[in-house]
Image (cartoon, rainbow, N blue to C red):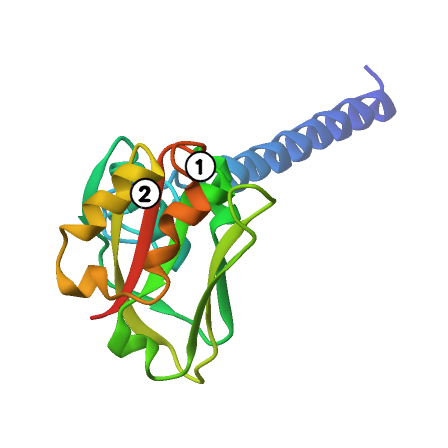
Amino acid sequence: MSIKKYKLKKGGEKMKLKIISILVILFVLAFGCTQVPTCGNGICEIGEEGSCSTDCQVTFTANDHIANALNAVKSGGQTTTQNFELTPNQVIKSSQFENFGFDSHSIIFAVENKLFDNGKITVENEGDYGSDGFSYISYTGAFNLPVKAIVICEQTGNSLDETINISSELIQDAENIDTAQDMCGNDEYQPCCVVIIENR
């Protein structure tokens, strides 16, 4: 073998080794230094948000708390949400819960009287069961307001009205609660639910 051919062959082998070395380094960097997130190790790692509540804190909005309570008593009953906060200039509408199987007519918002009297909360119904009605609550305060909600559902407006009439004074006297049957009708919209926001 000539010296020239030998040098070319040796140079080719060096080039192959360099290419293999580069590929190995790239492989190690791409796969060797990357760890799969481990749920339960106490560290909120990339990829765990929304799927590992033990490591990454889950933040529930006011709508989340209300939706969870509505779903819990959809077939009838009463529950109270966990504590949550209304944020400045927040508006919650009954139509925002249609994805959970409720009609905009079937949820009525009401507010505990002493909370309503602070002048920063508005609760109203737009329309009634014969129109494109919905109920809403609006908070105009400058700071987050700590609250919770009593949620009561019955199958019809009539049965919800009866339940309210035998309930506590806090429920009976809540602002806007007397419109429950007007929004749901006697049995036009089912279930019929009231969400009473109260101070916590």
Q: Quadrant of residue 123?
A: bottom left
Picture layout, residue 39 above or below residue 144: above
What amino acid type is highlighted by mark number 2? Leu
User: Viewer-proximal residue, 140 or 167?
Assistant: 167
In the image, taking residue 198 as reference, residue 20 lies left or right, namely right
The first of marks 2 and 1 along the sequence is 2
Is 67 or 42 nearer to us in this picture?
67
Label 1 sits on residue: 102
Q: Amino acid at mark 1?
A: Phe
* Res. 61 in view: no
Residues packed near mark 2 inside 10 Å, few (<14), some (14 to 19) or many (20 plus): many
Q: Position of residue 49 (x, y in %)?
A: 40, 48
Q: Position of residue 126 (x, y in %)?
A: 55, 56
Residue at point 28%, 50% (across, down)? 55
Residue 106: where, in percent of width, then height? 42, 41
Q: Which mark is residue 70?
A: 2
Q: Residue at x 76, y 26 (%)?
A: 12
